[in-house]
Amino acid sequence: MTSERARRRFAEVALPHLDDAYCLARWLTGNPADAEDVVQEACLKALTAMDAALIEQPRAWLLAVVRNTAFTWLKKNRPNAVVLTDDSELIEIAAAKTADGAGPNPEEALIAAAEDAALEAAIAGLPHLYREVVVMRDMNGLAYRDIAAAIGAPIGTVMSRLARGRAALIAKLGSKR
């Protein structure tokens, strides 16, 4: 049972960063429902640790908990194979984007959906070491030192992984054109 102090501290430290936690979990798991499970499990771990934890960088600390929880969850619940979506899903996404009439025309929506899917697939295809730093930096906007704290690596390692991840994305997406 957690103390009232731990619950208040959790609300102050972790709750403001739940969107970033979910974003990272979604990219690491590749699935919104699985990401919710990972974030929920990570929040329980964070809440349990709240009384004893010394937290200097709350966002980086929470993302480290989410990252470790995601890797444990993936190892337990997922095979190592990657499954790609088929094109019929892109058509459904494009149709949903143009259903209200306020968005782009169907052709533009389909192109945008295909580009979004290609980017998601390229990010999902990155090795975990590169994917996590790309998501933390380019999607969550974390500083290098915060990423370093979250993954437990030197800043130079973060920078090199980010550069390699971005280069792999450019190579993958550039070959599609």
Image (spheres, grey):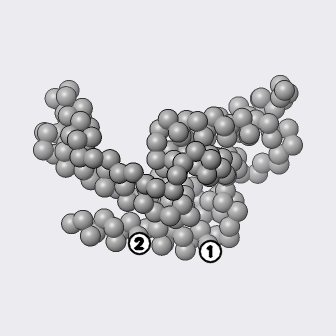
Mark 2 and mark 1 lie on one chain; the one further toward the N terminus is: 1
Residue at point 34%, 71% (across, down): 171
Residue at point 33%, 67% (across, down): 172
Residue at point 58%, 36% (across, down): 37
- Amino acid at circle 2: Ala
Which label sits on residue 156?
Answer: 1
Image quadrant holding the C terminus, namely bottom left
Answer yes or no: is residue 12 visible: no
Residue at point 61%, 72% (across, down): 157
Would you place residue 147 above or below residue 85 in this image?
Answer: below
- Secondary structure at badge 1 equals helix
Which percent across, then down, holds residue 156?
62, 74
Answer yes or no: is residue 84 visible: yes
Which label sits on residue 133?
Answer: none
Q: Nearer the viewer, residue 131 or 12?
A: 131
Which percent across, then down, holds residue 115?
27, 53
Dot 2 corresponds to which residue?
Answer: 167
- Secondary structure at badge 2 equals helix
Q: CA distance from mark 2 to mark 1?
A: 16 Å
Which percent across, then down, holds residue 176?
24, 65
Figure quadrant of residue 88: top left
Would you place residue 43 above or below residue 84 in this image?
Answer: above
Image quadrant holding the N terminus, namely top right
Of discs 2 and 1, which sits in the foreground? 2
- Amino acid at circle 1: Gly
